[in-house]
Image (tube, rainbow, N blue to C red):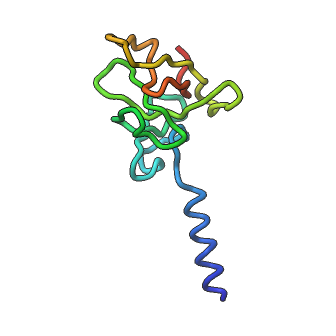
Amino acid sequence: MIRLVVATLALVGTVACTPTVGDPCELTRQCGTTLTCDTTYPEGYCLKVGCRAGECPAEATCVDFGDENRYCMRSCSPDNECASNVVCRAAPACEGQTTIDRSQPCSMEAQSFCGVAP
């Protein structure tokens, strides 16, 4: 019985500590096996490089900054605060845009995201 309790607690601890998109980080290994640490953000930012609409985790949206990659960034709304190192940025839908201005990124799902203030 004691082994079962210890094993259950270990499993719960592992699940509770799983990194998610938008978590602060210093090293990529802090972001788990599927995310990368972007250290250009203050306090770091766990994100996924390379996505299309619908490919990000539930807590994220696919954002196009007008460079060669799109990134899974934490979704947000005015009542859903971001981490202290970022702000909730409105992002228009990418659909129909022919060029993307890096200072005004778009979201494949037309959702706001947690990012550095413009």
**Horizontal and vertical percent for residue 97?**
37, 12
Q: Quadrant of residue 75?
A: top right
Q: Write the residue at 58% across / 77% down.
A: 7
Among all residues in the image, which is located at the extreme bottom? 1
**Horizontal and vertical percent for residue 89?**
57, 20
Q: Write the residue at 53% across / 26% down.
A: 111
Among all residues in the image, which is located at the extreme front? 96
Q: Write the residue at 57% across / 56% down.
A: 17
82 lies above or below 9: above
On screen, residue 26 versus residue 11, left or right, reads: left
Q: Quadrant of residue 103?
A: top left
Q: Quadrant of the N terminus?
A: bottom right
Q: Quadrant of residue 72?
A: top left
Comparing 34 with 98, the one in front is 98
**Horizontal and vertical percent for residue 69?**
32, 28
116 lies above or below 27: above
109 lies above or below 105: below
Q: How many marks?
A: 0
**Horizontal and vertical percent for residue 113?**
54, 27
On screen, residue 98 versus residue 57, left or right, reads: left
Among all residues in the image, which is located at the extreme left? 68
Q: Write the residue at 33% across / 10% down.
A: 99
Comparing 90 with 11, the one in front is 90
